[in-house]
Image (cartoon, rainbow, N blue to C red):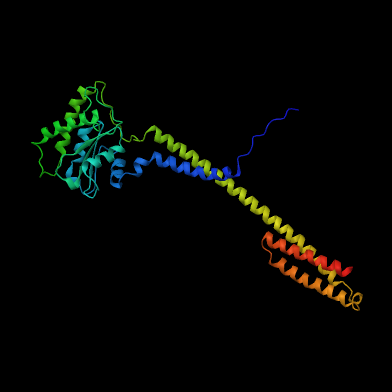
Amino acid sequence: MRLQSVPAAPPRRMRRVLPLLVPVVAVALLGWSNVGYLITAPEARTAAAALRSSTVYVTPGEQEVLDAPRVEQVIGDRPIVVAVLADTYDGDHLDACKVVARLQPRTIVLAYLGSERGAYPAICATDRFPEPENVKDSNLEDVSRTDTWLAGIARTAQQASQFRVNGRQADRTPEIEELVLAFDVRAVLDYPAGVPTRKAGADPRTWAAVLAELAALVVVLASAFAALRWLARRWREWLQKRYALRDRKLELDARLSQVAHQMVNTRPELWRDDPAEAVRHAEAAERYVLALAAFEAARRPDELDAAEEALRRVDQALARARA
């Protein structure tokens, strides 16, 4: 007969640590996949969520900044979105643009701020937006070819729209119209293969984030199953201990009844003329009373152990009395 080696069980410390690591891993995966969302200001989150199904988001109270239906018509399916945030946003319009772009990774974002009424919109895109082919790299380290390309579009549109809008004019829709025209001209020159169109409702999350969330979901489900299994095991152990304690109490109760029967049926005339024998019987009776009190008060295994020990002393006292 060939013997097979049995894999050793993991150390007890490892078995205790593993259940704690599972929820930690799940939280880490969910946090990593949603870190961009978690660190984003609530106003920008609202704007980014609305821009998944629309090309224009205007914060309530700032409707005079843009003619939203006209802007949506002008933009069409181009990879451009416009966000108008309220003056309560904590930051400038370029910061707002980058924050919204973080949640719209393949889109050019234009951002207006109510606190900077009359200023030209900030324009930006994240690293995942395709870079133009016919634009040279910038000499500045923190400026990409896409940023250089967008700056050229903004400069052209600003010059073209300066005769249509001014700092005192609330409606900035002409700026968007000129910027879209500049975008079309430069896209033909610098994107020979064309610029990807934008589909309404597209999910801006990366595949890595989606896989991380799926992995976190699997971990959470596995954790829930492990937790239910652990609770079931603990419940079964609790029931087993309770039944075992009940059986021990029934057994001890029967022994106490047997000892009481022996003590009640002991004939006094056997030890009436022997004072030492009477003392031993009195000691046995005293210990029986103590054992009975310990039994009635027993609720835990250690208390039941004490009651059993007290009953053993009663047996010993009765044995000496019979000697």
Q: Is residue 262 above or below residue 238?
A: below
Where residue 309 sits, quadrant-wise, is: bottom right
Q: In this view, does 246 lie above or below 160?
A: below
In the picture as drawn, the residue positioned furthest to the front comes out as 276
Q: Nearer the viewer, residue 70 or 5?
A: 5
Where residue 184 sits, quadrant-wise, is: top left
The quarter of the rendered structure image containing the C terminus is bottom right
Which residue does the image show at 20% across and 44% down from the upper left? 113
177 vs 197, left or right, is left
Which residue does the image show at 18% across and 39% down from the upper left? 121
268 vs 252, left or right, is right
x, y percent for residue 235: 62, 51
207 vs 291, left or right, is left
The quarter of the rendered structure image containing the N terminus is top right
x, y percent for residue 55: 25, 37
Q: Which of 4 and 69 is in front in this view?
A: 4
Q: Can residue 52 be seen in this view?
A: no
x, y percent for residue 217: 47, 40
x, y percent for residue 46: 30, 44
